[in-house]
Image: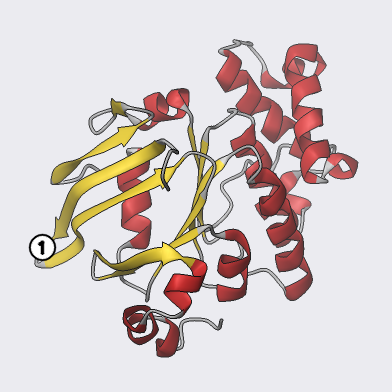
Amino acid sequence: MTGIAALLELNGLHKRFGGIAATDGLSLSVFEGECLALIGPNGAGKTTVLKQIFGELQQDSGTIIFDGEEVSALRTAERVHRGMSRIFQTPELLPEFTALENVAMAVQARLAHSFRFWRDARSEPALVAPALQILTNVGLNDLADQPSGMLSHGQQRVLEIAVALASVPRMLLLDEPMAGLGPGETRQMVELLVRLKRSTTMLLIEHDMDAVFRLADRVCVLVAGRSVCIGTTAEVRNDPRAMSAYLDAGQGHA
């Protein structure tokens, strides 16, 4: 992407678990303002890549550059502070707290507010107002007072994105956001992510190929920890390496 800066750069990432290479010299860039989809068969190392980027898993070798700064040795919290946020394969919410409280807690973490009792923080405008605005932006404002554990799976997935947005990220790391969603919920999730693309760079792992080709500007096909091809959605659709490694292997449909 000529003329556009790389927000994230992975250079020669290696990670082995025993005799298995989860990432095997992986190098790729994610450019400011794009959505790069990372696809591949189960066991290809996709989630391992996200864990290394987010600081949950230390690579054996290689470097991670974010916004021009090497972050390879930084803790997850420090990477969040620099503008990363992650959506996990299954929602990680506080089920006893309301949707509003879940988001307000994330706002609290970003603003470094401190309260002796979390419940008292619900009346704090510096937390509640931005949290409610985020819920409105993702379409959950009508469920603000609903305990997150009572929400449907699809609503929980959207709420997790709202929580991630509370940190005002420059990049979202999305690990199978469509997992477990029905057709209607999937359409709504794709529409939400399309809107978020306008302001947030994304690295997306997803098995739903319809969603991938709707969202992604570029696609990287990962097999056994290696990138076998990377290009625009049209290029990957027509690349025989991608077809043999993934698309023809029954891992989705184009």
Q: Is residue 178 left or right of residue 29?
A: right
Decide: is 149 above or below 121.
Answer: below
Q: Amino acid at mark 1?
A: Gly
At x 80%, y 29%, the residue is: 133
Query: Which image quadrant for residue 196?
Result: top right
Q: Position of residue 24 (x, y in %)?
A: 17, 60
In this rendered view, identify the residue nearer to me: 192 or 140.
192
On-image quarter of the C terminus: bottom right
In this rendered view, identify the residue nearer to me: 76 or 39.
39
Q: Is residue 200 left or right of residue 181?
A: left
Q: Residue furthest front?
A: 2
Decide: is 133 above or below 54.
Answer: above
Q: Position of residue 204 (x, y in %)?
A: 50, 56
Q: Residue furthest right?
A: 142
At x 77%, y 52%, the residue is: 150
Q: Is residue 70 left or right of residue 67?
A: left
Residue density around tag 1, few if under 14, some if 14–19, many if 20 or more, within 10 Å: few
Q: Position of residue 6 (x, y in %)?
A: 39, 38
In this rendered view, identify the residue nearer to me: 180 or 243.
243
Q: Position of residue 23 (x, y in %)?
A: 22, 58
| Residue 124 appears in view | no
Counting every numbered tag in the picture gives: 1
At x 38%, y 24%, the residue is: 78
Decide: is 134 above or below 49.
Answer: above
| Residue 126 appears in view | yes
For disc 1, the marked residue is 18
